[in-house]
Image (cartoon, helix red, strand yellow):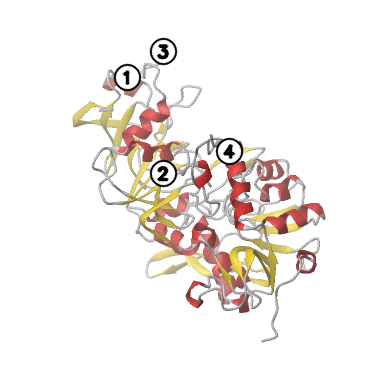
Amino acid sequence: MSINKVMSLEAAMAHVPAGTRLMMGEFVGAGEPAKCIEYLVANKIGRLTLIAVTSGLRGDFLMGKLFAAGLVEEYIGTHVATSTEASDAYLSGQMKVKEIFPMGTWAEKVRAGGMGLGGCLVPVGVGILDAPGLFPDMDEPKRTIEINGRTFFVEEPLTAEVSIIRGWRGDALGNVEFRYMAAQNQKDLAMAGRFTIAEVNEIVPVGTIPPERVGCPGPFVNAVVQSYTLEQQHALYRENWIKLGRLPKPSEGDAA
Amino acid sequence: MNHLHGRDPRVVIAQRCAQELRDGEVVNLGIGIPTMTANYLPPGINVIFHSENGCFGFGPKPTTLGADSDISNASTEPVTLLPGAAIMDLATSLGAMRNGYIATSVLGGLEVDQEGNLANWAHKRNGKWWPGIGGGMDLCHGVPRIIAALQHTDKHGNSKIKKRTHLPLTGKNCVKTIVTDHAVFDVGPDGLVLREAFPGLTVENIRAITEADFTVSPKFGPMTL
């Protein structure tokens, strides 16, 4: 087959100009597409609308650097203060947040966007999140609907011009395999983006990933780029966790 | 010296919360004091810890060199996976929270009131409601037993156990039990019922620092820590 979605970081990121509506896989700093974030920061690609479940993690975790560099114009997610960088951008008025979503609502909005649905009906937060004045910058008040005697919010789908996800192994067809909690909702994000970049720890020959282990099928992916290797990534996270006091410094004789 | 005789109030709360957990149940611990609860499970009590980023059955912190960048909890602290652990995607994990598959959740709070309303996601800064909801609202919506774990008073001495919450809520009428560094209350149909106080404290001591109305359980006694 002649399909080859593997490309350089520069070629893939040429699809992300300033002003892009961008979805990104991550969870409080875990599962971040590190090389793509570094590229955005190095090339100062700004005015982004960033759709991500959290706003990263402080310290040397990477997504926070997008906020610190002033690249994010609007954030659509569940928490503006998992990184101090995002919190500062929001409180100073530099970054717009029209509304904050419960995590399950956000995940279903992304899923609706990926699956081609008109939205989803969510009971969480009814009578709380629709309180007048809570989110003054919302485009329109939250809509509700009654079904079988219960009240639900009508939540519209979330889609993006570009989605960037991070996986473990990827191949030329765009198939991506995830490890453990880094699966997150990266497949849904991939489906909700018009152009999807998968940053992976390891690029492997087609056929290497067992079909049942493909977490994001190739047709949902447009570009596969090389991330840090898994060993490099482990080393970076351990270093950051030590800096944040979440792990002790390894002493001599410690074994894995 | 405070009423705890120098003990860390956060540890007292976590230790007391741990006694509320039931053997074999699925438990989600919120960020902060609730997370510390896992360190104080009584002997013979084993639970399945759920992490909202997509796991049932995570275990303690690994060694530094054993830490895996793709295995962490909802606060992105490195954890391990116990035998029998199960990974799921984020939408499934939040669905489990919303739809009753988690038996008990221990959550921190800014305020809780005598009707079991919990506020823990927003306070006003620079004129904006800040900082964020995360998975807390999904838990309050779908988890049958919410335990609110918080210090009894704020740093100015004001009661966090209110007659009525003023901050935007995380959940309505969802809290079943409140554990503080002073007391344990159950939220009943007729309001709060004081079940325990920190050893040495009287009902009058608790009343003096509690804004909410409460009755006293016939089983009222000291916390066992």
Q: Secondary structure at mark 4?
A: helix
Report the chain holding disc 1: B
Q: Which residue is mark 3?
A: B1
Q: Which residue is mark 2?
A: B60
Q: State which tag comes first along the sequence, 1 or 3.
A: 3
> What's the amino acid at mark 3?
Met
Residue A48: horizontal and vertical position, in percent? 75, 58
Of residues B30 and A74, the one drawn nearer to the viewer in this rendering: B30
Say the numbered circle drawn on residue B205.
1
Q: How far separated are the C-alphas under marks 3 and 2?
A: 33 Å
Q: Residue at x 70, y 76 (%)?
A: A5
Residue B5: horizontal and vertical position, in percent? 37, 16
Of residues A177 and A187, the one drawn nearer to the viewer in this rendering: A177
Report the chain holding disc 4: A
Q: How far separated are the C-alphas under marks 2 and 4?
A: 16 Å
Which image quarter: residue A178? bottom right
Q: Secondary structure at mark 3?
A: loop
Labels 4 and 1 touching (C-beta < 8 A): no
Say the numbered circle drawn on residue A242.
4
Front tag of 2 and 1: 2
